[in-house]
Amino acid sequence: MTSSFEFWDYFIFIAYAFLILGVGLWVSRDKKGHQKNAEDYFLASKSLPWWAIGASLIAANISAEQFIGMSGSGFAVGLAIASYEWMAAITLLIVGKYFLPIFIEKGLYTIPEFVEKRYSTNLKTILAVFWIALYVFVNLASVLYLGSLALETIMGIPMVYGVIGLSLFAAAYSLYGGLSAVAWTDVIQVIFLVLGGLVTTYLALNTVSDGNGVLAGLQTVYEAVPEKFVMILDESNPEYKNLPGLGVLVGGLWVANLYYWGFNQYIIQRTLAAKSLRESQKGIILAAFLKIVIPVIVVVPGIAAYVMINDAETMNRLGDVALNNAPSLEQADKAYPWLLQFLPTGLKGVAFAALAAAVVSSLASMLNSTSTIFTMDIYRQYINKNASDKTTVRIGRLSAAVALVIACIMAPLLGGIDQAFQFIQEYTGLVSPGILAVFLLGLFWKKTTNKAAIIGALVSIPIALYFKVAQNGWSSSPFFVDVPFMDQMGYTALLTMLVIIALSLFQNKGEEDPKGISLTKGVFNTSPKFNIGAFAAMIIIAAIYAFFWN
C-alpha cells in the first residue's frame, strides 16, 4: 500500500464498510414469524418509498464506470461526454410517464416477464439469456475491473486481491438480503458518492486555481481548454467516433438511454418495488434531478486533471507525487484515482469511500437482478415450476454467487482497455438496439407478432456485428461502411424495427396481435407534479446545451 493513506483515511473507510454491512444485514433479517418469500427477496416486499427509489436508481447507475470511466472520458473528450447524463434525465421522465404504468400494472418481477405477457415464453427466454450474459461478462466484469484498478492505483493493492475484496464486500449483504438490503444501503451509498465526488471536484478546481477557489478554478480550466467544453463535436475531433456530433442528440444515444433506463432489469427493478405508481414516479423525478448534477462530480474532475497534467507550473507545485500513476490520453482512466492522492488526510478516506460505494452498490444491484432473471425466468420456467418460496430464494442466492465467480475470473482479462466507459457502451450496444426495437414495437404497435419479434431480436445481432466489423478495419470494402458506434446503435435499431414490421405485416396481414397492449386505458394519467417536474428538467437541460453549444 502507498504511504499516502494515513490513519484517519483508513478509519473513515473501514467505518463506512462496517456501516454498509451493518445496515445491509440489519434490513436483511427475517422478521419474527416470517420467512423471506420471492417478493421480499426480489422486490423488497414492494415497500420502497420514493426517496429510496431515487437514491437507489442513482447508486445502481453511478459506478466505477462513471467515477473512473467517465472521468477518463472527461480527460480525453471533455464535457461532451456529459450528454449521457443530461439526456438520461429526460429519458427517466419518459420512462416514468409512459413505461412504468404498464410495468407496475402488470405486477412484473422481471423485464423478460413482460416479454412473455406480450409475446411468448420462447422470446422471453432468448432475451433472458442475452441479459444474463451481458450482466456477467460485460457489466459485472467491467465494474470489478475498474474498481480494482482504483484500489491498485490509490492503495497499491494488486488487482486480483481488489477483485476478490470488492466482490466479497458486495456479496456479504446483497446475496443474503436481496433487493431490500441493496436499496436501503443505496441511500447511504448515494450520500457518500455525492459527498466524495464534490470533495474531489473542489480539490481539483481549487488546485488548478492555486488555492483561489472553485469558481476561479472553473474559469481557469475553461480558459485553458475551451475545446473541452464543446458539447457538439465535429468530424475533425479525434473523439467524434465516440460522440458523433448532432447524432448524439437525435440518434443512437436515445437507443442507449431508452434501453438502459426503460428495459434494463437492474435499473427498473427498484421502480417495480415501489409502494405505488405515484411513489415510483416521484423517485424517477429525484433520480432525473441527480442526473443533471452528476457531471459536476464525475466529468469536471477529469477535465481539471487534464489541465493539471499539461500545466508545468501546477505539476511543479504538486511535487514528485504528481508523477505517480499520472494519466495520459492513452491511459485516461487513471485521471480520477490520480486526483485522489492529492486530497488531505480524512477527505481522502471520504472520497475513496465514495468510489467504493459506487462500485459496491452497482455490483450488488447487478447481482440481485442477474439472480432475479435466472431464478424467475429460467429456473422456475424450465427446471422447477413448483419451487417453493424458500427454494426460490436459495436459488437466487446461489445463482448470484455463480455469476460473481464468473465475473471475478473475467475482470482481470479486461486489463489494458482505454476509456472503459466507452468500452461498456460499445459492447452493450451490440444487443441493446434489438431489445429496444422489440419492446418499443411491442408497447406501441399492436400488430407486432411474436415470430417477427423473435426473428428481429436474433437478426439484430448480425446487423450490429456488420457495423462493428466495418469499424474494425473493413471500411475499405464497398460492402462495409465505417460509422461511429453511437450511429451504429441507431441504424441497428431502425433496421431491426423494419424487419419486425415487415414480417408482422406479412404474417398477420393487418390483424392486431391479441396480446397487443392498448395505450388508451388511462394508465398514463400522471399527477400535475410529475408533469411540472418533467418540464423543469427539460428546460434546465436545454439551457445547459445552449450555453455550451459552441
Image: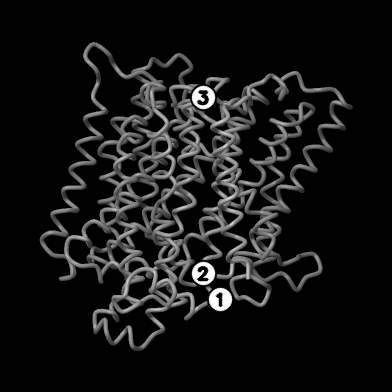
| 24 and 527: which is toward the camera | 527
Task: Tell whether 151 sits left or right of 424.
Answer: left
Q: How many marks?
A: 3
Indicate the position of residue 240 as horizontal and vertical percent values: 63, 70
Task: Tell whether 284 sits left or right of 36.
Answer: right
Disc assigned to residue 81: none
Kindly identify the amino acid type of the residue bearing the numbered disc 1: Glu
Secondary structure beneath dot 2 equals loop
Task: Tell whether 41 sits left or right of 139.
Answer: left
Q: CA distance from mark 2 to mark 3?
A: 38 Å
Mark 2 touches mark 3? (CB < 8 Å)? no
Kindly identify the amino acid type of the residue bearing the numbered disc 3: Leu
Q: Mark 2 highlights which residue? A: 78
Q: Quadrant where the N terminus lies? A: bottom left
Q: Mark 3 highlights which residue? A: 277
Disc assigned to residue 227: 1
Q: Residues within 10 Å of mark 2 (few under 14, many from 20)?
A: many
Q: Quadrant of residue 2?
A: bottom left
Q: CA distance from mark 1 to mark 3?
A: 43 Å
Indicate the position of residue 196 as horizontal and vertical percent values: 30, 56
What residue is shown at x 31% (from left), y 36% (from top)? Answer: 174
Secondary structure beneath dot 3 equals helix
493 above or below 71?
Answer: above
What residue is shown at x 67% (from left), y 20% (from top)? Answer: 522
Q: Mark 2 or mark 3: which comes first in sequence?
A: 2
The outermost residue toward the top is: 33
What residue is shown at x 55% (from left), y 48% (from top)? Answer: 88
Mark 2 touches mark 1? (CB < 8 Å)? yes
Q: Quadrant of residue 129?
A: top right
